[in-house]
Amino acid sequence: MRWTKDDSDKAAGAGGGAGSRGYHHGNLKEALVRAALALIAEKGPAGFTFADAARWAGVSPAAPYRHFRDRDELIANVARLGFELFAQVLAKAWDEGRPEPLVAFDRLGRAYLDFARAQPAYYSAMFEAGVAPDADPALREASETAFAVLRQAAEKLVLLVPAKDRPPAMMVALHVWSTAHGIASLFGRGDAARRALPMPPEDLLEAAVLIYLRGLGITAG
Amino acid sequence: MRWTKDDSDKAAGAGGGAGSRGYHHGNLKEALVRAALALIAEKGPAGFTFADAARWAGVSPAAPYRHFRDRDELIANVARLGFELFAQVLAKAWDEGRPEPLVAFDRLGRAYLDFARAQPAYYSAMFEAGVAPDADPALREASETAFAVLRQAAEKLVLLVPAKDRPPAMMVALHVWSTAHGIASLFGRGDAARRALPMPPEDLLEAAVLIYLRGLGITAG
DNA sequence: TGTACATCAGTGAACGCGCGTTCACTGATGTAC
DNA sequence: TGTACATCAGTGAACGCGCGTTCACTGATGTAC
């Protein structure tokens, strides 16, 4: 029932100047999310206000209240969309383990870091904005869907280990997630708080995962 | 030359009510750091203002300007002290690899997570407050000192691997740091943004490190 | 096809509030002699 | 030991500002008939 009423909205988004639009924005909820993303990318998750978002979207400061109770609800919405996108990106990279699990798993790790670098604003909202995932059921579900991709990948991977030595897939998924998140948040970001690194983050993660998998008894070829 | 003039300052710290003190606070710089720690612990690194810190310390809102240019400088100071404490804690846990490197390394990992849990305010200021470590030379140095402990430990560990297969100690240090940081920031914190975990974070890290070291060719015993 | 009406989404003015920052000041401390 | 003085550290009042939030309102849209 709802579709983008006016494509010029999207084109005009970047500057915040809404140009000529009617009395109704037509797509304000989405525009506020885009505003939040732009402002988080610019100044961090704590660096913008509800009024900023309204200004960026070119509406009066009272308008956002038609769509979000407060700033936290807006950020939670951004985080939810981020997890949904993240889940898609990860699922596509994993591709059900084709052509073979080890190759696909490497792709998955790279996709993780790609996402953190390409979408620092989403990543911030998802992991650093202090949003409690349990507060909003939809957010929680989106977060779990994204983790489920990692977990399914781990399940397929541990099948490469003989049954008697096979580790719990959950543990493997948590290990890889932690390492990927650690690398992403320490080294894989575009902002000033990033630490310098003598190699690309992707290579650091790939090496860590290869060594870890060897420790599990999984080797390439 | 400077020492704590009045011990009641410390005792009175928790409530912010300074009780009876003279016109001069005597130790305001330190009190502001403690205020920042308390407020970060309570509401996160973005959840307090310069004026809050002054109020907490029981001084007028103009007083902090005698010691810090602005809020960022206060937070950078907190982060620096955090790294100094962190370096001490890690060095003590590592204890130069006694009685043997593997045992000491496990202790080091646990100390890392202990610190993140016991000092969430320091940990936030150090890693999540968006402070650029390069902005302040003292901060940068403290941060490097802390990392150096991890790196020295890694150097001793890789000696357990035959020379021809020996990995770079730097890489090992970065892998372990990333994993520890990932676990700490995803699961090892006291606040609401923490994810649930089916096991203690320490055990998750220990397992990850053991598997990783086995992948390097290092096994216990 | 046209008209009346209900509903929706954004307006703009207003409010109280707390923040960051400045300023001339003053109480307390330390030091020279 | 005492006095004069320089320096330091905190005061309190003031300011302009932007924020969050509310309110009665109004333009636009959709629908019943």
Image (cartoon, coloured by chain):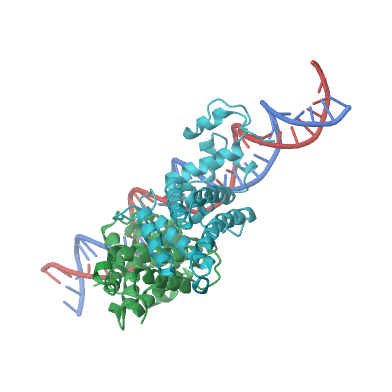
Chain colours: A green, B cyan, C blue, D red
Query: Is A32 placed left or right of C20 in the picture?
Result: left
- Quadrant in which the C terminus of chain B appears: bottom left
The residue lying at 42 percent from left, 71 percent from top is: A211
Query: Is B58 placed left or right of A33 in the picture?
Result: right
The residue lying at 43 percent from left, 76 percent from top is: A11
Image position of D31 with respect to B139: above or below? below
Can residue B61 be seen by looking at this rendering?
no
Can residue B26 be seen by looking at this rendering?
yes
Image position of A218 with respect to B126: above or below? below
Q: Nearer the viewer, residue A121 or B195?
A: B195
Q: Position of residue D29 (x, y in %)?
A: 27, 70
As drawn, the residue found furthest toward the front would be B221
Q: Position of residue C31 (x, y in %)?
A: 80, 31
Image position of C7 with respect to B65: above or below? below
Q: Position of residue B87 (x, y in %)?
A: 54, 51
Location of residue B57 by image quarter: top right
- Quadrant in which the N terminus of chain B appears: top right
The residue lying at 31 percent from left, 66 percent from top is: A147
Query: Is B159 placed left or right of A177 in the picture?
Result: right
Q: Nearer the viewer, residue A1 or B208?
A: B208
